[in-house]
Amino acid sequence: MSLPSIDLSGPLLWFANRGTGIVLLVLYTAVVLLGILSATGRGPGRFVPRFVTQGLHRNLALLATVLLAAHVTTAVVDTYVDIRWFDAFLPVGGLYRPLYLGMGALSLDLLLAIGVSSLLRSRISERVWRRIHLLAYVSWGVAVIHTLGIGTDAGSPWGRWTVLSCVAAVVVAVAGRAVARRVQVVRS
């Protein structure tokens, strides 16, 4: 009995890549939002312990990492466009929409640094870990640019609303964190 063959130029990989891309934007937005909530010490509600927020932050980041591997794999394996495996990691030299592909690679590289530092958290100083972890904002912003430039659904009404909602949520959360810090400084 032989296994069915997968058409590497057919729509299946393209749909998988599109689907994982938009889900990744939403998931990483949730991860950033939960990170902000954890950093400010405020949970989603008064009755949600901080460890729940942090655990959800960690687990969603892990899920997003698995989906990111699927996103990169489908982009590389799909023969419709020429994306080589190293294009996923090198921000320069891509053949297909090089600027936006490079933005995706940069975002991935920053996420790798964040992930490695989190795995090494007990072996590095809190200060170093926090500074590296702040790269999440840059990684997320660069991923948004990647989505807008290379995402085939970014121009659709639902795609625009999804991106706009993600950006608005992070902007509001960052502004709220800044206000909370300022209030904390004034009270000190």
Image (cartoon, rainbow, N blue to C red):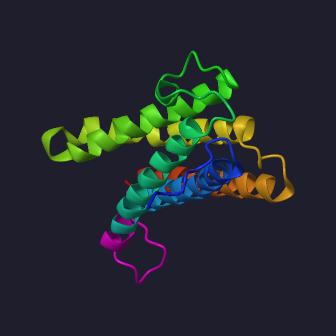
Residue 9 appears in the picture as rendered: yes
Residue 45 in picture, x, y percent from top left? 48, 78
Residue in the picture at 67% in, 41% down = 9
Examine the rendered structure and indicate whether residue 162 appears above or below residue 78.
Answer: below
For the magenta stretch, what is the residue range? 39-54
Residue 31 sits inside the magenta stretch: no
Does 6 sit left or right of 56 as displayed?
Answer: right
Residue 168 in picture, x, y percent from top left? 69, 54
Q: Residue furthest front?
A: 1
The foreground one among 135 and 126 is: 135
Q: Residue furthest top?
A: 93
Residue in the picture at 83% in, 46% down = 155
Residue 42 in picture, x, y percent from top left? 43, 67
Does 139 sit left or right of 158 as displayed?
Answer: left
Residue in the picture at 33% in, 43% down = 115
Q: Residue furthest bottom?
A: 47
Q: Quadrant of residue 98?
A: top right
Q: Quadrant of residue 100?
A: top right
The foreground one among 20 and 179 is: 20
Q: How many marks on residues?
A: 0
Quadrant that contains the N terminus: bottom left
Does 83 sit left or right of 51 as displayed?
Answer: right
Residue 48 sits inside the magenta stretch: yes
Residue in the picture at 57% in, 50% down = 6
Residue 14 in picture, x, y percent from top left? 67, 47
Residue 187 appears in the picture as rendered: no
